[in-house]
Image: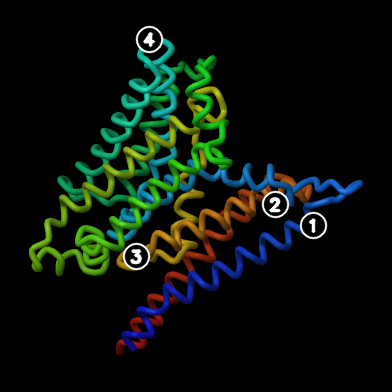
Amino acid sequence: MKTGWKSLPLRHETLLLLVLVAEWLIFYFTGTTVKRGHTFGFGTFDSQFDILRHSAEIGLLALVMTPVVLTGGIDLSVGSTLGLGAIVFGLLWQSVGLPPWLAAIGAIGLGGLAGGLNATLITRLRLPPLIVTLGTFSLYRGLAEAITQGSITYTGFPASVLALGQGRLLALPTQVWVLVLVAVGAWLLVHRTTLGRSFRAIGLAPEGARYAGLPVERRVALAYILAGLIAGLAGVIYTARLGQARADAGTGYELAAITAVVLGGTSIFGGTGSIHGTLLGVAAIAVLNNGLIHTGIPREWAGILTGALLLIALTASAAAKALAKRRGM
C-alpha cells in the first residue's frame, strides 16, 4: 500500500507529460500554416520562444508557491506582490534616481517584506493562510494603485533592463535562465535538503512535526518569505519584458501559479508534491494560452480553461487523498 502511494506522484507527472505532448501536437497541427515553404504560427521557433518568455513570471511564482502548498498553506498575494514590486522598481529608478540594479534589489527586498508580513500573521497570530493572503492580495494591489494614483505608468527603461525581458542569452530568452536558476535552487531545496523534507512533514501533520522537534513556525515563515522575494524578482522581469511598470501588473497570476502547482501533482492539502511536476504544470498552461492564440480561439477561453484545469486538479487531489486513506485502512 505504501509503495503504491509513493509512486502516485510519478504516475501523475508521467500522465501530465503525455497530456502536454498531446496538447503541443494538437496546437502544432491546428495553429500552424505552411505557405511557400515557410512555417507560420504555433510551429515556429519565435512562437516557442514566446511560450518560454511569457511563462517565466508565472513559472517563478509557481516554483516558490510549491513549498508554501507543501506546508499545507496558500499564498493568494503573489500576483499583487509582483505588481507592487514592478511599481517600486519603476519608482526607485525613475523618481528616486537609483541605478536599475539597485532599484531591482529594492523591489526584491520589498517582496521579501511582503512575504514576511504574511509569515508573521500566519505563524505568530495563527491566522488561516487563505484569509491572510486574501487580505494582503487586496492590500498590496491597493498600495500599487495608490503609489501610481491609478494612472501613472513608468516607462523609458534603459536597454540593460529591457535585455532581461526582451533579449536572448545563448539563443534562449534571457529570463529563461533566471527561471532555470530558480528552478534548480527550488528543486535542490525541496528534494535534497532536510528543510525540504520538513515542508512535507509539516503539511502532512503539523502537530506531529512539532512533537518531532521541528521549528514549524520558522519553516513555514521561510516558505512565505521566499515566495515574496521571488515575486519581487518576477515583478522586475515583468517590467523588463513589457518595458513598463503599471499597477495592474501580474493580475490573475496567482490563479495561474496555483493551477500550475496543483496540476503538477502537489496536493492542495500539503505533504506531497514536486518541483518538476510544477514545471510540467507551468508548461501545460503556457502551451494552452499560446496555442489558443494561434488557433484563433478568443482569449477569454484561456481564463475559462485555466479555471477548469484548477477545478479538475483540485478534484483529482482530493480523490487521491481519499484513495490513500482508503488503502491505508
Q: Position of residue 239 (x, y in %)?
A: 50, 28
Q: CA distance from mark 1 to mark 2?
A: 9 Å
For residue 291, the mark is 2
Secondary structure of residue under mark 3: loop
The Cα atoms of the two marked residues, 3 and 2, are separated by: 31 Å
Q: Quadrant of residue 242?
A: top right
Q: Is residue 299 left or right of residue 219?
A: right
Where residue 122 sits: x, y (%)?
Answer: 22, 47
Q: How is the image coloured?
A: rainbow
Q: How many marks?
A: 4
Q: CA distance from mark 4 to mark 2?
A: 41 Å
The residue identified by callout 1 is: 30
Sooner in the amino-acid sequence: mark 3 or mark 1? 1
Q: Nearer the viewer, residue 315 or 221?
A: 221
Q: Which residue is mark 3?
A: 269
User: 85 left or right of 125?
Assistant: right
